[in-house]
Amino acid sequence: MHTREEKLEAFGRLIDLMDKLREKCPWNAAQTMESIRPMTEEEVYELSDAVIKKDMGATAKEIGDLLYHMVFYARIAEEKGDFDIADCMQKIIDKMVFRHPHVFGPEAGTPTSAKEIADTWELVKAKEKGGNKTVMEGIPDSMPALLKAMSMQEKARGCGFDWEEPRQVFDKVKEELGEVEEALDEQNRDNIEAEFGDLMFSVINAARLHGVDPEKALNRTCSKFRRRFTYLESKTLKVGRKLTDMTLAEMDEIWDEAKALGL
């Protein structure tokens, strides 16, 4: 591991690198915040993949890629006279100090559990904003819907708006499923979409209340489906056939083989 001085020196080298690239590389010089935003989103997902796979080498690399992007945004802003990387760091420092009164405030040193901190997190944030913003305003519109639902539910929980008992949410799931079936019977496309959204939101809520990360759970099922479908496809090709030529019953038989193999 590196010393504090070595870490600071490394960050300085990254800033120097960015300065040189913006000045001497035509591609880097042409970029804007808007042009690198999609690449930043991709880097976030790559970091997420590395963390899920517990690949520390890849995780270190992806954190570096994201750091590069953060320095990139700050350099673009600095050129326009808006702010620089020091401003960015000071803003997060100020925010974290304010949101951790149990560490930096008058009550510093007072024993506080992780649950107590989580339960009051949104209230502390609301106090920080001086009541000028609503709790939900901090959730980006561009966030993927599953993660957005999870974030909304967590923020509502932080304000005390949540189910008293986790199992209570299953009544809501059943209610929403019934409303989906009713909408399907009515054949109203707008209602069908709305009710499916309500059902998925309630299922995500149920997962959250039972300590399950819905994103991780769904990814796990996607990986399982990929393995089994790949087995189905490869076995079909081995006998010289195409999936489109097979009956559903024939495909189900091979699918069950994949399940039996633990795929």
Image (tube, helix red, strand yellow):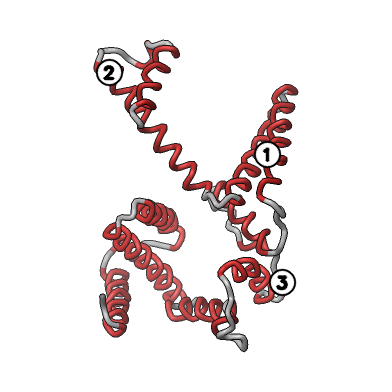
Query: Where does the image place residue 218, in percent across and percent down from the top left?
Result: 49, 41
Q: Could you say which is closer to the camera, residue 164 or residue 248?
A: 164
Label 1–label 2 contact, CB within 8 A? no
Q: Which is nearer the N-term, disc 1 or disc 2?
A: 1
Task: Determine which quarter of the picture holds residue 241.
Answer: top left
Left or right of 188, for residue 235: left
Q: Which of marks 1 and 3 is nearer the N terminus?
A: 3
Numbered mark located on residue 173 in the image: 1
Residue 262 at x, y = what percent? 35, 31
**Residue ID for mark 3:** 132
Three-letter amino acid code of the residue under disc 2? Leu
Tag 2, which secondary structure? Answer: helix
- Mark 1–mark 2 Cα distance, whole angstroms, equals 41 Å
Q: Distance between the residues labelled 3 and 2?
A: 61 Å
Label 1: element kind: helix
Q: Residue furthest bottom?
A: 106
